[in-house]
Image (cartoon, coloured by chain):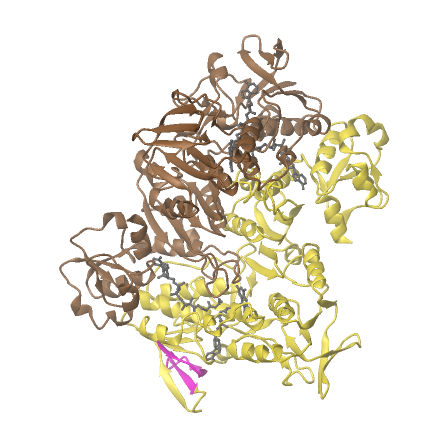
Chain colours: A yellow, B brown
Amino acid sequence: MKIVIVGGVAGGASAAARARRLCDNAEIIVLERGHYPSFANCGLPYYVGGKIQSRNKLLVAPIDMLRQRHRLDVRIRSEVVQIDRDNKQVSVRNLESGEEYTETYDKLIIATGASPFRPPLPGIDGPRVLELRDLNDADRMYELATSGVTRATIVGAGFIGIEVAENLVRRGIHTTIVELSEQVLPPWDQEMIAPIDEHIRAQGVDILLGESATSFDDGPDGLTINLKSGQALKSDFAVVCIGVRPESQLAADAGIQCGDRGGIIVTDQMQTNDPDIYAVGDVTQVSCFVSKTPTQIPLAGPANRQGRIAADHIFGRQSSYRGTQGTAVVGVFEKTAAMTGLSEKQLKRLDIDYEKVYIHPANHAGYYPGAEALTLKLIYAPKTGVILGAQAVGGDGVDKRIDVIAMAIQGGMTVEDLEEAELCYAPQYGHAKDPINMAGFVAAGVIRGDQPVVHVDSIDPQMFLLDVRSEAEFAAGHIPGATNIPIEVLREHTDEVPKDKTIAAYCKVGQRGYLATRVLMQRGFNVVNISGGYTSWLRSQ
Amino acid sequence: MKIVIVGGVAGGASAAARARRLCDNAEIIVLERGHYPSFANCGLPYYVGGKIQSRNKLLVAPIDMLRQRHRLDVRIRSEVVQIDRDNKQVSVRNLESGEEYTETYDKLIIATGASPFRPPLPGIDGPRVLELRDLNDADRMYELATSGVTRATIVGAGFIGIEVAENLVRRGIHTTIVELSEQVLPPWDQEMIAPIDEHIRAQGVDILLGESATSFDDGPDGLTINLKSGQALKSDFAVVCIGVRPESQLAADAGIQCGDRGGIIVTDQMQTNDPDIYAVGDVTQVSCFVSKTPTQIPLAGPANRQGRIAADHIFGRQSSYRGTQGTAVVGVFEKTAAMTGLSEKQLKRLDIDYEKVYIHPANHAGYYPGAEALTLKLIYAPKTGVILGAQAVGGDGVDKRIDVIAMAIQGGMTVEDLEEAELCYAPQYGHAKDPINMAGFVAAGVIRGDQPVVHVDSIDPQMFLLDVRSEAEFAAGHIPGATNIPIEVLREHTDEVPKDKTIAAYCKVGQRGYLATRVLMQRGFNVVNISGGYTSWLRSQ
Ligand SMILES: Cc1cc2nc3c(=O)[nH]c(=O)nc-3n(C[C@H](O)[C@H](O)[C@H](O)COP(=O)(O)OP(=O)(O)OC[C@H]3O[C@@H](n4cnc5c(N)ncnc54)[C@H](O)[C@@H]3O)c2cc1C
Ligand SMILES: Cc1cc2nc3c(=O)[nH]c(=O)nc-3n(C[C@H](O)[C@H](O)[C@H](O)COP(=O)(O)OP(=O)(O)OC[C@H]3O[C@@H](n4cnc5c(N)ncnc54)[C@H](O)[C@@H]3O)c2cc1C
Ligand SMILES: CC(C)(COP(=O)(O)OP(=O)(O)OC[C@H]1O[C@@H](n2cnc3c(N)ncnc32)[C@H](O)[C@@H]1OP(=O)(O)O)[C@@H](O)C(=O)NCCC(=O)NCCS
Ligand SMILES: CC(C)(COP(=O)(O)OP(=O)(O)OC[C@H]1O[C@@H](n2cnc3c(N)ncnc32)[C@H](O)[C@@H]1OP(=O)(O)O)[C@@H](O)C(=O)NCCC(=O)NCCS
């Protein structure tokens, strides 16, 4: 068996290593265009910022290890320029010598990844307009960032843009982020990411939303980034991080089927339309685990596991890719945003019915020092309660809650399963009723009709806004037009609540508002609780 | 509807609060023997140690809040001394006045918890032999611990004993722990808890295993704790934490059925044999989620949820308790031990077939600073791969992995589901192949026969021990009798490996040993990998 793998990093190296374990006498050739196989793409921003100090650490599996331990024929600076399916061979260009040769295969695995998208803007190819995909890019950025420069502009506020921003700030560089959409970190829902936006700005980063770069002028006094609005930003350099595109041209040219957005179409065993050719990682189009619709989510976990699955299939192991859940996390100046499953905006786009709840608990028992607030949004099917997605932002413990819900989604579990989840509890780790349980309680209450809710984006001006917090809390700020009746005395003051209107009760986070809702419902009022309370309302403003 | 609740802390207060939400005009009386309802038992050790500074913070729901917000008739210092089922009434003793009165009920909820076990040892009732259950106990221990004393002895190395030890050390007190069994934290398997034992000793705590107190002598120069071995420990005070016993006498006296170990027997809706009487929390016997056998696991999460379920059933909501998974966590001087499901020793006791694997990954990508080693033991059904339990020890990220597996157990999921788990990955949070995936890979490999393993406790002296680490690693220490052939050169040296013996390959943690196993298997050798490698072997010594 002779396996040729194109691309030698996350998906490719994983496929190669797994294939070697499954078959020690297979011939396995890994062709990598760059200078290094198997490096830590995800660590690059932190190397630029100096958080990771040793460049060597980024070489996860150095070439010698792959050669000796795994007996892989790894060839760097080797670009595959053509796939000849009829003769089952590829043409390889040695980028050092310029020479080309062919290599036959029994099975071919395409793991070429995705390259940063570079729109054809004037000046974008200038020397001070960077991108960040590989070690060469990182070296260049490292050099610039440590050369005494003071101003950088990042175009694009996705994961990589935000990680680069954090790391340039770490180097003392004043950083501006320009983002086309109306929020940073577009995969998250806007209201969830608002506190992260605020937190980034609080570090001195300028964020320009609804804005885009139209051209780059490289002049003697620095780089000018011209924006759609007419504004011009002076910078020492710019980094373009506006998403990636599958590197599928090679495959497409050989008649391998690709999807609308360029990803190679694969089966659950990562086979393309040519059964001898597999594709894994960022170059593929996969199906979304929740909606079963086609998607492209360029993340390292899926790439690694897909590589493993392709090798499994070649050697007759039964494993199959279940689709991508979109579980993602990003660190933002010591805060964390994480998500799994579908976002609300994706659900809207796909026209899938959903309900949602928000909670704002602390990551662990409030009486134990160091508790940090987190916000958790749980999205689920309105009738069955099957979990469709979740997002969380905050500090410690955010990734934990999303991982637990990711597992629940994989298991097809419901909000009732979250109610009954039995999770680790000691005061420094969680709560006797963990945020996971709490989200389950609230969502199940909504489904059962015990807790009718209204979301801040749907509050109707006709509603009677009832603030059940204390007088002091009310005085410190409230939703305009609200009437204050603290929950403690509500039962004696129900005559002040109108019977002919819908009452929208609220408190700080939703819990007292819920109790008020129960008190009023049982007295015949038409009442809903504002989900997430004043905290969610404030974020929506 | 008139509901009387006996006991007003985790289970009782939760039942009361939920009942109130479900029915605002029910009469709900909470009878609590102590001075405070709804306090943070779990915070008591940290208050003693000064980590939690404000005593007030321990009052999670102060009595006024329960009265005003939840309209609960909370009566403290009120002990229920008798249940009269025929007349559906309880006798209540006012512990302040000594007076007794009766209170009728429509539904009674028993949430009396469990009290520290105090064996009838000479001197155990002396003033310097403490226990820790409530705020009074904490006040007493606080006073002693801050009075300039220097030596304390803790009898019992369960959660509470260990937490108390940590907090006495925090106060600068030299602490000795005496434990009857051969390990600290008996719910965990011994080999898993070995590094925690070491870590506790490294803080200056003396641990005496296989040892127990036989009597306490209170003398002018301090307390003497006499041990089974004949040894006598001088201390300023002792704390007895050798487990708890359900406070079920009250119920038993009224003909409520209890199990062998004293817990009140309940249905999944928390009903006792008297349908108008419920029992929740530490006082109950529940079934184990995994084995379906009766168990008593005194933890706050289950108590809280059971209280909610009892209230649900009274008010016609469909919810039911699924059994206790035994998910638990304990912080030990900045390290963490966590577990979920059944331990290996429980499985043995229950004679349930299982397989297990050990991995020793870092909590997050090694190339990102601050990675900490953790050890994860995954226990599963040998054929189906259904997960039966997991234990982890280490630093950050231990609770997260156990919570994810707890959710997987609840969902009846298998090791293959762990292989395909899609979890949060960025370098400061995890790995592209998270420890959860890794445990799934290894376990699935064992099931599929791709990775035959042997555990350190089953290594046969007839086996040929093959150390595939580097020469330097081998030189620094190895299993006696092992032969060193580094994995990188193994393929050229297979002639040095005997064909007529079982080869037990190993490396530092199991990964290279696995690769060696693959290499040799495919060449016709009879080979197994030592699960967890040299790290696991060292721990077993
Ligand atoms: C800066 C940065 C930070 C990231 N952070 C995270 C994170 O925190 N979490 C996360 O989950 N993901 C993160 N990612 C994404 C993650 O790195 C990718 O999803 C993953 O590497 C994809 O694996 P892959 O094997 O498909 O592609 P890649 O890892 O990109 O590997 C593809 C390789 O193929 C080579 N190649 C392409 N074409 C050819 C050819 N014709 N011939 C030969 N070789 C070729 C390329 O040189 C490349 O090295 C990050 C990515 C970047 C760039
Ligand atoms: C020091 C300590 C640390 C702990 N740490 C943790 C931890 O980190 N994580 C965890 O999950 N669990 C922990 N626990 C266990 C947890 O607190 C219990 O599982 C939980 O409180 C049980 O709830 P419960 O309602 O059943 O009983 P309790 O909370 O004990 O409440 C029972 C109440 O009933 C009252 N009562 C008893 N009999 C009568 C009567 N006849 N009349 C009136 N009142 C009566 C008692 O005074 C008591 O206040 C800890 C416990 C202690 C003591
Ligand atoms: C380094 C690299 C080549 C390793 O590939 P790999 O060997 O398949 O993966 P790992 O090192 O994670 O090891 C996983 C294997 O070891 C086994 N293993 C892990 N721990 C083990 C243990 N303690 N005992 C036995 N086996 C173990 C697993 O079962 C698995 O083998 P399997 O797939 O045959 O079941 C590849 O992951 C890579 O190139 N990574 C860097 C690039 C990258 O991912 N970038 C994006 C993220 S920054
Ligand atoms: C304090 C105590 C009385 C609270 O009981 P509780 O009100 O049932 O529990 P919580 O405060 O956690 O609130 C949970 C309720 O609020 C609701 N809720 C929580 N956050 C909400 C939000 N943002 N929006 C709407 N509802 C919310 C939940 O749905 C749940 O209501 P439900 O059960 O009717 O579905 C009880 O937990 C207690 O006594 N705790 C201390 C004792 C203890 O547990 N000790 C051991 C651990 S230290």
In the picture, residue A47 is in which quadrant? bottom right
Residue A48 is inside the magenta segment: no
Q: Name the residue located 66 percent from the left edge and 67 percent from the top edge.
A: A157
Q: Name the residue located 85 percent from the left edge and 43 percent from the top edge.
A: A462
Q: Position of residue B117 (x, y in %)?
A: 43, 25
Q: Position of residue B217 (x, y in %)?
A: 40, 24
Q: Name the residue located 55 percent from the left edge and 17 percent from the top edge.
A: B276
Question: From this viewpoint, is residue A479 visible?
Answer: yes
Question: From this viewpoint, is residue B447 visible?
Answer: no
Depicted B492 relative to depicted A222: above or below: above
Please indicate whether residue A20 sits to the left or right of residue A447 in the image.
left
Report the quarter where the N terminus of chain B lies: top right
Region rendered in magenta: A73-93
Q: Position of residue B147 (x, y in %)?
A: 55, 33
Depicted A306 relative to depicted B43: above or below: below
Question: Which residue ends up furthest to the left in the rendered image?
Answer: B500
Please indicate whether residue B422 sits to the left or right of residue B230 in the image.
right
In the picture, residue B390 is in which quadrant? top left
Please indicate whether residue B284 sits to the left or right of residue A440 in the image.
left
Q: Toward the viewer: B357 or B100?
A: B100
Depicted A55 relative to depicted B477: above or below: below
**Count of marks overlaid on the render:** 0
Q: Toward the viewer: B467 or A526?
A: B467
Residue A92 is inside the magenta segment: yes
Magenta-colored segment: predominant secondary structure = strand
Depicted A529 relative to depicted B110: above or below: below
Q: Toward the viewer: A253 or B427?
A: B427
In the picture, residue B245 is in which quadrant? top left
Q: Toward the viewer: A383 or B395?
A: B395
Q: Position of residue B130 (x, y in %)?
A: 48, 27
